[in-house]
Image (cartoon, rainbow, N blue to C red):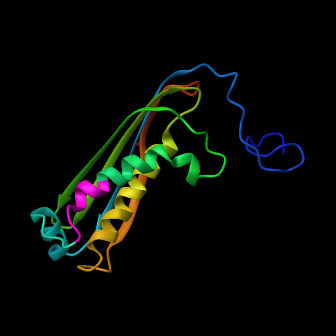
Amino acid sequence: MADLTHIDDEGAARMVDVSGKAATAREATAKGRITMSGEATAAIRAGNVKKGDVLGAARIAGIMAAKRTSDLIPLCHPLPLTGVTLDLEADDTGVTATATVRTTHTTGVEMEALTAVSVALLTVYDMAKALDRGMAIGEIRLLAKSGGRSGDWTAE
């Protein structure tokens, strides 16, 4: 089991020790989408959802989630984030969320970007579920990461 980074020699879970790694500027961008009825997207775009500003609440929820990722994902390192941006774009069939997270640290921020997108989309669902309970969240993926020993990566 020596090849598994989050498992020790006895098979127990462990947090990877990153203390020997150099602190470098790191960034990750993730994207996801929630699809819904035209009625629901029209209400979101017009600001006519009874629970309030859906996109504003989702943006704050996603940013807060990025900051709390280590509380949600086992063995994820708590990181001092230096920046989180979360863009939400509503169109005729749903909302697309794109999050970019930055830090200067010894490990990357991919999980923080993915968590930000996931929680933002869950918040959209929560706030608009009275309009469309059949909304579908999906297409959540990492688009790019930079920094660290493994270098830059971009989705195809």
Quadrant for the C terminus in the image: top left
Asked if residue 15 is positioned above or below residue 51 in the image, the reply reads above
Residue 145 showing in the rendered view: yes
Between residue 64 and residue 15, name the one nearer to us: 64
Determine the residue positioned at 56% across, 21% down: 23
Residue 2 within the magenta-colored segment of the rendering: no
Residue 31 showing in the rendered view: no
Task: Give the number of callouts.
Answer: 0
What residue occupies the far front of the structure in this picture? 51
Asked if residue 92 is positioned above or below residue 146 in the image, the reply reads below
Between residue 148 and residue 156, name the one nearer to us: 148
Residue 76 % position (x, y) = 61, 44
Determine the residue positioned at 46% across, 43% down: 67
Asked if residue 145 is positioned above or below residue 48 in the image, the reply reads above
Residue 58 % position (x, y) = 31, 57
Determine the residue positioned at 20% across, 61% down: 53
Which range of residues does the magenta coloring cover?
A: 51-58
What residue occupies the far left of the structure in this picture? 46
Residue 111 % position (x, y) = 51, 45
Residue 54 within the magenta-colored segment of the rendering: yes
Determine the residue positioned at 30% across, 51% down: 59
Q: Quadrant of residue 121?
A: bottom left
Relative to 33, 51 lies left or right? left
Residue 106 % position (x, y) = 59, 26
Quadrant for the N terminus in the image: top right
Examine the residues drawn in magenta and state their main secondary structure.
helix
Between residue 92 and residue 106, name the one nearer to us: 106
